[in-house]
Structure formats: C-alpha cells, structure tokens
Image: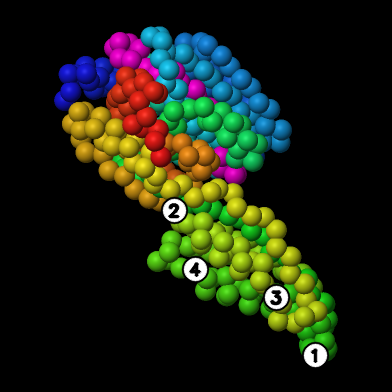
C-alpha cells in the first residue's frame, strides 16, 4: 500500500459503524421520484447530514424542480488553494413508492445492508461524504468539490438536466456515484431513448361487420414486431416495447392503441438508424394513423481518451490500496452520460458494491462500501495533487 494512503484504510475501517448508521438513516428516508413533499423532506435531511459530516459549504445554489425533485449544488473549496474542480453527481430519489418501508425496512444482515434505494444509489452518496471527511481528518489533499444533488434521475432528469449540463461545464473531472458493476467502474454507457406510439384506427363491430373498421391493435402489433426485429445485439442496440394498451371491448375493433418503447444504442450511427426507423413507420391500412412522440433521453457515453486516462488514475489508486480495479461498459444510463457528451472526463459507478437495483433484493456490501470510500478518497487526493494546467487528464 502506498505510504500516501497508509492510514486511510485503517481510519475508514474504524468508522464502519458510523458509516453504516448513516446509510441506514438515509435509506430509512423515503424519497420516491414522484413525491415532491417527501423529496423535499429528504433533501433537507441530507443537507443537514452533509453539514454535520464535512461542514458548511462555501456556496450553495438551489434550483426548484417544479413538479420534480429540487436540485441543490454545494461548493467546497480546497483547504489548500487548488485550481482543480471536481464535480460529483448524486441523485437522492428512488424508484420506491411511499409506504415501501413499512414492509421492507433498512436491515443490517452480516456484511449486507438491504432496503429501498440502498444500492441505487444512497450508499454512493454516503461513501462520497465519508471519503471527503477521511481526507480532511487525515490531512490528505482535496480539490475544489462541487456536489450536485438531484431528485429526478430515476424519471429522466427532466428538471435537473439543464442544471447538470451548466454546472459541469467548468469541471476538470466528473465523478458519478451510481452503483458499481460488481465493483467495476463504468467507463461507457449506452445512449437511451423513450418513444411513444399512438395508432388511430376506426371502430366497427368485430362480429357483425368484420369487413369494416380498422383495428389499431392490429396495426400496432405489426409495428411492434418490426421494432423488435430492429434490435441488433452485435451493434449494442435494443428496442423493447414495454407497455402496450388499446381497445375498449372484445367485440369492437380497436379505434386506438398505444405503446411505450425503450431504446438503447452504443453509437450515434445506430441512433440515426433508429430515428429513421420511427420516421419511416407507415400503417398497413392507409386510413390508419401513426403518431410518434418522445425521443432521446441520454446521449451515448463513449470511453474517450480522457475517460480512459481518468480510469488509469483510479486504477493506480486502487493498486496502491491493495486491490485491482476493473472497468465495464453497461447498457444502463445515468447523469454521467450528460457530462460525457460535453467532452468531460467522467468516471461512473463509484458507488456501492452490491446488487438488485430496482428490486426487493437490493443490497450493498459493507466491506465493499469501505473499499469504495477509500478508493474515492484516494482519487480525490490524486486529482488534488494534479494541476489543471497539466492536461494529462483533460486532453480528449
């Protein structure tokens, strides 16, 4: 282990109980994406907790999310003047509805903590805050840190996207505390789109007048087959019609039908192919009408040269801490896609080691959380020691 980090793992290990207690407290706050009141209460608690752990921020910016969760940006200037700015992205909303805790509270079971939102991504936020505290306590350097908390990531970052894109612009690096991929960080993510299809036909009695009318369900079903046939796993492209509705009665040809489509792509070329596919949809019966809405929610996050160099730095830190860090490309997307699309070095998946995102089996490893906390501490320390005038990390 590097002498720079000789005390780091030991100190973090001594804080195990406090770190776990913080995680349980945070998971015990319900913050469903669709509940503005609970989100506001959760965010207020999180800010008080952050202040208790690492002190008052040097600057605070609040953005009302409207119908969605609010956004808070906290600025912490380096104790030793630094020209390096690192932005950390964390969302505090979860997919779990109000009342989930009644039947599934946060529970500690050996090395595991389970509970709604523990893996995605409340553990990541706890790890980040304790990493910052570790460096402050041990005298390890810290860069200027901008911590962005948003409450609508799980439903597409509608309110927070412009804030994220504005706030990361002057950053040297962007660290994302979404859950890891079995301990691996994420250096590439697919782009994603959510599209809606609305088909209008013409109602008629299915038994007495079968030669008349136009079934919107029939038209939509043919479209669904075409869309699923457009999936190309070799190119990293998937199309999935996850929701489909239509019709009023079994003996009436459906006058309307609709579907929601999830699309994931690994390249701009594939995104263009999918766009052309949707634009070229035509009904079998010319009297039917097809309307396409929605669009791309996240751009592709490519493993750029800048991202590769940032990963190398993180891997060197991990080696000094006594373990091997791996990287992975994943099909899911995050707010890291938004920062990467601006050409910034992004390291994603610095959050929990565990499994079960969006499922009732969601869990995180406590020992893994301690490891990730130390990794984050080391990354922040190394970045603080690198001047932004050294373009070794920012050259893309």
Give the number of the mark in front: 3 or 1. Answer: 3
Q: Residue at x 42, y 21 (%)?
A: 84
For the magenta stretch, what is the residue range? 134-156
Q: CA distance from mark 1 to mark 2?
A: 45 Å
Q: CA distance from mark 3 to mark 1?
A: 21 Å
Please tell me whether residue 252 belongs to the stretch shown in magenta. no
Q: CA distance from mark 4 to mark 1?
A: 34 Å
Image-quadrant location for residue 281: bottom right
The residue that label 2 is drawn on is: 331
Label 1 sits on a secondary structure element that is: loop
310 and 238: which one is in front? Answer: 310
Q: Earlier in the sequence, mark 4 or mark 3?
A: 4
The residue that label 3 is drawn on is: 282
The residue that label 4 is drawn on is: 231
For residue 155, above or below residue 150: below
For residue 317, above or below residue 201: above
Please give the label number shown on residue 211: 1
How packed mark 4 is, by other alpha carbons closer than 10 Å (few <14, some 14-19, many 20 or more), is some
Q: Is residue 318 left or right of residue 223?
A: left
């Amino acid at each position: 282990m590097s002498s720079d980090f000789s005390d780091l793992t030991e100190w973090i290990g001594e804080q195990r109980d406090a770190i776990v207690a913080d995680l349980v407290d945070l998971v015990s706050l319900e913050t469903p994406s669709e509940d503005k009141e609970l989100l506001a209460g959760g965010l207020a608690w999180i800010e008080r907790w952050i202040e208790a752990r690492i002190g008052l921020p040097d600057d605070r910016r609040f953005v009302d999310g409207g119908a969605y969760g609010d956004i808070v940006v906290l600025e912490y200037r380096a104790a030793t003047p630094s020209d390096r700015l690192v932005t950390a992205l964390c969302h505090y909303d979860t997919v779990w509805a109000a009342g989930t805790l009644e039947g599934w509270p946060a529970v500690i079971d050996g090395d595991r903590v389970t509970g709604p939102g523990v893996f995605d991504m409340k553990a990541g936020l706890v790890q980040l805050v304790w990493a910052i505290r570790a460096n402050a306590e041990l005298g390890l350097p810290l860069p200027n840190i901008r911590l962005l908390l948003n409450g609508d990531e799980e439903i597409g970052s509608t309110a927070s996207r412009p804030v994220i894109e504005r706030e990361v612009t002057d950053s040297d690096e962007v660290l994302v505390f979404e859950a890891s991929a079995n301990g691996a960080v994420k250096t590439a993510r697919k782009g994603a789109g959510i599209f809606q299809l609305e088909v209008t036909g013409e109602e008629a009695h299915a038994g007495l007048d079968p030669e008349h009318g136009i079934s919107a369900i029939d038209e939509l079903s043919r479209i669904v087959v075409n869309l699923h046939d457009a999936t190309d796993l070799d190119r990293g492209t998937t199309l999935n019609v996850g929701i489909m509705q239509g019709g009023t009665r079994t003996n009436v040809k459906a006058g309307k039908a609709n579907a929601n489509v999830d699309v994931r792509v690994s390249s701009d070329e594939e995104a263009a192919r999918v766009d052309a596919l949707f634009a070229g949809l035509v009904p079998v019966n010319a009297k039917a009408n097809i309307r396409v809405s929605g669009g791309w929610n996240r751009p592709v996050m490519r493993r750029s040269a800048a991202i590769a160099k940032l990963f190398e730095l993180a891997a060197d830190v991990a080696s000094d801490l006594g373990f091997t860090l791996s990287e992975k490309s994943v099909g899911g997307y995050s707010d890291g896609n938004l920062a990467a699309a601006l050409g910034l070095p992004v390291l994603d998946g610095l959050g929990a080691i565990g499994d079960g995102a969006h499922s009732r089996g969601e869990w995180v490893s406590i020992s893994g959380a301690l490891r990730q906390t130390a990794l984050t501490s080391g990354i922040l320390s190394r970045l603080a020691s690198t001047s932004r005038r050294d373009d070794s990390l920012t050259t893309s």
